[in-house]
Structures are given as structure tokens and as C-alpha cells.
Image: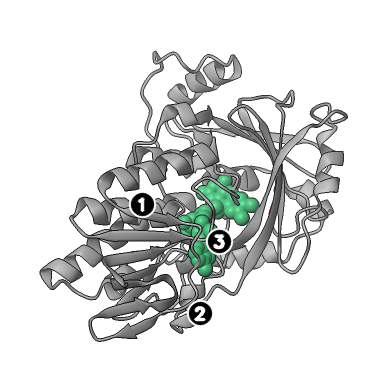
Amino acid sequence: MIRKFDVVIVGGSFAGLACARTAALRGLKVAVIDAKAEPGARVCTTGIIVKEACDDFDLPATLMRKVRGVRLYAPDDRALDLHAPGYFFQSTDTPGLMRWLAGEAERAGAELLYGRSYEGALEHERGVALPSLGLHAGFLVGADGARSRVAEHFGLGRNRRFLAGLEIECEPLEIDGRFLHCFADSKIAPGYIAWAVPGVGLTQIGVAARRPAKPDLGGLLRRLKAICDVREIRVVSRRSGLIPTGGVVGPLGGRRVMLIGDAAGTVSPVTGGGIHTALRFGRRAAQLISDYLRDRGPQPASVFAREVPRFRMKLAMRTLLDLAPPNVLINAALMTRPMRSLAQRLYFHSRGGDPAAFEAWKQAFERDELESPALPSTKLHLV
Ligand SMILES: Cc1cc2nc3c(=O)[nH]c(=O)nc-3n(C[C@H](O)[C@H](O)[C@H](O)COP(=O)(O)OP(=O)(O)OC[C@H]3O[C@@H](n4cnc5c(N)ncnc54)[C@H](O)[C@@H]3O)c2cc1C
């Protein structure tokens, strides 16, 4: 028997679940299929969430940990501390967050079919048939990640440039929990950085490199010796995956199908961050599909293509980063004023704000007293 849905979403991760929740809340009959056995299984991401995502979406604080600063290390171990008034990142219990997002989508009315793989579909006048799954969709959404099978089958745009990322989760290490510790080092992370993140109940240590270069996790562990004791690392789990860095793909969809999240390439080509855009444009896609199916609205993919970020500057920066400047150059440049300002903008989208407020913030940050709300107000300059 064929089961009929208004929307079938391939991929039950950040983009797919955000899309499913909104589509179901708008009254559409929604199914999500995912090859994983259950939500939260085989997580492939570090899972850091930027403040803007926490402003746009109400995510549970119990599954996150605020980290307010970035300590950026040069290859020679000198470090630059960056932070901005009022800003933070959140490291996450990513499997827990994924289960929570799945629960929210289900509570809204979406049906979640884990342990089911997409293998192909046939588009026709009134929808899309998925014979191997016994499903029919009025609209099909490809939220199936960097190497989207949906994109491949429908001849849609494909990601072509990637970073390869590798991470271990281990029992908490003694690192300064105020910071994301980031290592600029072209030997161990050509084209990107390596990191040590104070996570939720564990420490995450990872590295990524532009393909085809390989990230050097052993090299990172050797460097970590400078900031903590790594002799007794107890690894709890591992994560790895591809990060698309070529910008938004095209075409993004057709009459009855569209791509979202990493499948669509909505990832910052510089930072590799894609969770905020996956959530944001996953939800937006659901609104457009609902308008299309219910209210004769415009083709979702064509509106979507106009709204998603172009990343023009970031793509130009990616081309420079892919050249992996030699470590001697990074050592010479990283502590200079222009590089500091560039790093501040990349991590915090901020030029620093009102100097008096920044000074008060800096003192509170250095004393680790930031839970106190009694700081003078300041203005963040968004770029
Ligand atoms: C190592 C690493 C670290 C990262 N760190 C961060 C970070 O700290 N912060 C940040 O913002 N971004 C980070 N990113 C990027 C971020 O993880 C992605 O942008 C985000 O996960 C995209 O979500 P998505 O829902 O589009 O796709 P994904 O999270 O990739 O999910 C795709 C889903 O589709 C399913 N699927 C795939 N193929 C099929 C199929 N044929 N049939 C059924 N199901 C299928 C998969 O099982 C998966 O659940 C990182 C990426 C990597 C690889």
C-alpha cells in the first residue's frame, strides 16, 4: 500500500527537522525519512551553535553550554583572545539536541521514519513517488546533507568543494572553559583550523582540512600538550564528516522538489558553520512549500534561491584559505592589528562596540564573572 503525504523530507537532522516541524504546524501531512537508526545516532558535527541561532530558535539551555570567547593560537603557540560584549557560542549535547528537535517535529504532527534510506523517486505532474519506501509526496525535500542523493537523482546542484572534519569526544580535559580554543596551523589543518571545545560534560577535540588534504589529529594532540595534560585522554566517541564550502548550489530545486541545509550548500565557506542556516532556511522552506501547496503560492525553489545567502565575500576568502598559507606567514601575521580585527569580525561579527562598555565587559570576562547582568549597555555592530 502507498502512503500519501503532502511533504516527504529526506534527512532528519537540523534542516529536515526544522522544516518538518513548521510544515506540520501549518497543517501539512509530513513524513521524515532518515537512514540512521534513531535521532541523535552517528552525529557528524561539533554542534556549536552561534548566538544568532539561539535568538531565532528557542533551544533548551539544559542541552547547551555557553562559551563566550575564542582563544586563537598561532603555530608558534602565541595566542590571541577574542570576545565581544554580550556575545556567546553554545557547545551542545548534540545527540540530545537532535532528539529534542525530533521530539518537537513529532509533537507538531510530523511522522518520523528512521532506519529508512532514500534510494530514488519519480516526479510526475501531481507529486513525487518513492516506490522503494511505499510513499508518495506532494513535495519532496532533500535535507540529506553534503552528498545529497536527492540532488543527484533530480539533477540538481551538487556540492563540489569540501572540508573533511574529524573529531574525538573525550572525558573533560583541564582547559580554560571560557574559550573555544582554535589552532591556526597549515600543517595539521590546511585550509581550516583545529579546535578544543569545552562541551557539555566532555571535551571535543577536532580538526578539519580542505580536501584532498587530510586533517592531522595526531598533530593536534601534540599541540594540545601546550595547554593541557593529554596523557590520559579517554575517548568516548568520534565524529567525522564533510563540510561543503563552495556556497549555495544551483539549481536548488524543481517543480516538486527542493534542497535545504548542507544539501543546498547553505554553509559559511569560511567558518564551516551550517547549523544556524540549516534551521533558519529549513523553517523558511516549509513556509514556502505550504504556500505553494495550499495557497497557490510561487515555486518554493525560485523564491528560496533569491533569499538564501550568496556568501560572495566568504567565497573569496575561502579561495585564499584553500591556499593554506605557510605557518611562518601565520606566525608573522596573526598578532597584527588588521588580522586581529579580521578574526574579531569572523568570530563575532563585531567591531568591539562602545570602548567604555567593552572595558567593563573585558574585566568581567577576565574575572569570569559574566553571569552578573550589571554591565553598561553596549551596541554590537553587525556586518
Ligand atoms: C566535523 C564537522 C563539524 C562541524 N561543526 C559545526 C559547528 O560546530 N557548528 C555549525 O554550525 N556547523 C558545523 N558543521 C556543519 C553542520 O554540521 C552542518 O551544516 C549541519 O549538520 C547541516 O545540517 P543538515 O540537516 O543540512 O544535514 P546533516 O546534519 O548532514 O544531516 C543529513 C541527514 O540526512 C540523512 N541522510 C543522508 N542520506 C540519506 C539517505 N539516502 N536516506 C535517508 N537519510 C539520509 C543523514 O542520516 C543525516 O541525518 C560541522 C560539520 C562537520 C562535518
Q: Which residue is mark 3?
A: 269
- Number of residues whose C-alpha sits closer than 10 Å to that of mark 3, classed few (under 14), some (14–19) or many (20 or more): many
In whole angstroms, how far apart are the C-alphas of marks 3 and 2? 22 Å
Q: Which one is earlier in the sequence, the residue at label 3 or at label 1?
A: 1
- The numbered dot on residue 152 is 2
Q: Which one is earlier in the sequence, the residue at label 3 or at label 2?
A: 2
Q: How many marks?
A: 3
- The numbered dot on residue 18 is 1
- SS of the residue at dot 1? helix
Q: At which x and y percent is residue 55?
A: 35, 38
Callout 3 amino acid: Pro
Q: Which one is earlier in the sequence, the residue at label 1 or at label 2?
A: 1
Q: Nearer the viewer, mark 3 or mark 2?
A: 2
At x 66%, y 30%, the residue is 202
Q: At which x and y percent is residue 299?
A: 24, 76
Query: Does the beta carbon of the residue at mark 1 sit less than 8 Å from ligand 1?
Result: no
Task: Give the answer, above or below, for where 80 lies relative to 36.
Answer: above
At x 74%, y 26%, the residue is 173
- SS of the residue at dot 3? loop
Q: Are marks 3 and 2 in contact (CB under 8 Å)?
A: no
Task: Give the answer, above or below, for where 249 lies relative to 271.
Answer: below
Task: Give the answer, above or below, for where 141 lies relative to 169.
Answer: below
Q: Is 182 situated left or right of 139 in this image?
A: right
Callout 1 amino acid: Ala
